[in-house]
Image: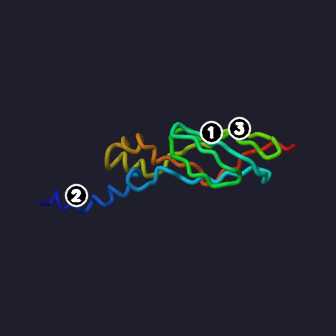
Amino acid sequence: MKINLLLLAVSPFLLCNCATLTEDAMTPVSVSFSDGSNGEVTLQNKRGTWQSEVPAVVSVRKSDDALKYTAKADDGRTAVGSIPSTMGAKIIASAVFIDFGITDAITDKHRKYPASYVMPLKKR
């Protein structure tokens, strides 16, 4: 009986700490050029490829690898690089309390990209 009450009392805390249950697989990333130019960008990671105008907010799938970008300004200048992915705090709770972080590691929902990223564009 005591074990059931303890499990009942602790389960809400365990479930709210798993990123797979509380995080969306997609995340918005605002992209723009360093000089304010307009253009187009292609964002890619192992989970997918997204194309968009610049500046824009693009909804991308979270992944454990960097979000690579290839961008072209309206005047022909290009920018190539990557946006790093970082680990969110909820993976720690999942690793300790629920499934040793296995589910979060498979889904990558515990990963984060910066909310906004300015792509460096060389001057003309």
Tell me the quarter of the picture where residue 69 sits.
top right
Please tell me whether mark 2 sits on a helix, a strand or a loop.
helix
Residue hosting label 3: 80
Q: Amino acid at mark 2?
A: Leu
Q: Residue at left 34%, top 43%? A: 100
Residue 3, given in percent of the width and then of the height, sits at 16, 57
* Residue located 33% across and 59% down the image: 13
Q: Earlier in the sequence, mark 3 or mark 2?
A: 2
Residue under label 1: 68
Q: Quadrant of the C terminus?
A: top right
Colour theme: rainbow
- Left or right: residue 53 versus residue 91 is right
Residue 59 in the figure: left or right of residue 93: right
Q: CA distance from mark 1 to mark 3?
A: 8 Å
**84 sits left or right of 47 in the view:** right
Assess disc 1: are there few (<14), some (14-19) or many (≥20) residues with their C-alpha within 10 Å of its C-alpha.
some
Above or below — where is 104 with respect to 57?
above
Residue at position x 52%, y 46% in the image: 61
Q: Nearer the viewer, residue 63 or 48?
A: 48
Query: Residue 71 in the image: x percent, y percent?
Result: 71, 42
Callout 3: 10 Å neighbours few (<14), some, many (20+)?
A: some
Q: Position of residue 90 (x, y in %)?
A: 43, 52
Q: Which mark is residue 7?
A: 2
Report the Cα–Cα distance between label 1 and label 2.
43 Å
Mark 3 or mark 1, which is nearer the start of the sequence? Answer: 1
